[in-house]
Image: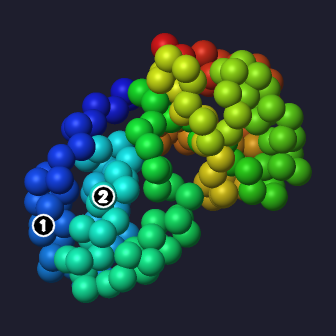
Amino acid sequence: MNAVYEPWSAARCTEIIESHSHVEGGVIVILHAIQDAFGYVPEPAIPMIAQARNLSRAEVHGVFTFYHDFRHEPAGKRVLKICRAEACQAAGGDALAARAEQSLGVKLGHTTADDRVTLEPIYCLGLCATAPSAMLDGKLVGRLDEKRMDALVAEAQR
């Protein structure tokens, strides 16, 4: 799955915020909707949400920065998330994360120079019984080993 995002537009952002005006305490829902539309949450969206929700910018920024799933900048065409939680680390996740970083030439939290793949850490996919785990564009993959990680990285680069 290759995601196609809309270019940033304040008018579109306003439309998204207004479409969620009925959702009580819906800051997280709005942030997700904005990220789904643009691929990230542009900085100008934070004060727009704050104003619409009668919150301070700091409150909205606090929600935005608390959750690792929200991005400050556009992601690559594919997003590979590697679980960095304790069960995955105990099952060899550190070595697999390093292997993915080396294969892609980027550290966790960064996008390849060709904008093809964003490599992100994620803190528990709920697959502890099949650790180490990862997720490529929302597709969960467990029981990773070097061979399966290499195949996952290759799939991400296609």
Question: For the point 29% across and 60% down, which residue is it?
Answer: 45
Question: For the point 76% across and 22% down, which residue is it?
Answer: 102
Question: For the point 80% across and 32% down, which residue is it?
Answer: 98
Question: For the point 79% across and 26% down, which residue is it?
Answer: 99
**Relative image position of residue 58 (x, y in whole percent):** 44, 78
Give the residue number, with chain letter if any, for mark 2.
44
**Relative image position of residue 25 (x, y in whole percent):** 31, 83
Q: Distance between the residues labelled 2 and 1?
A: 18 Å
**Relative image position of residue 43 (x, y in whole percent):** 37, 56
Residue 15 visible in image: yes
**Relative image position of residue 96 (x, y in whole percent):** 79, 33
Q: Is residue 57 left or right of residue 90?
A: left
Residue toward you, 93 or 33: 33
Q: In this view, does 140 lie to the left or right of 53?
A: right
| Dot 2 amino acid type | Pro
Q: Does dot 1 land on a helix, a strand or a loop? A: helix
Q: In which quarter of the image is residue 141?
A: top right
Crowd around label 2: few <14 · some 14–19 · many ≥20 (10 Å): few
Residue 156 visible in image: no
Give the residue number, with chain letter if any, for mark 1.
19
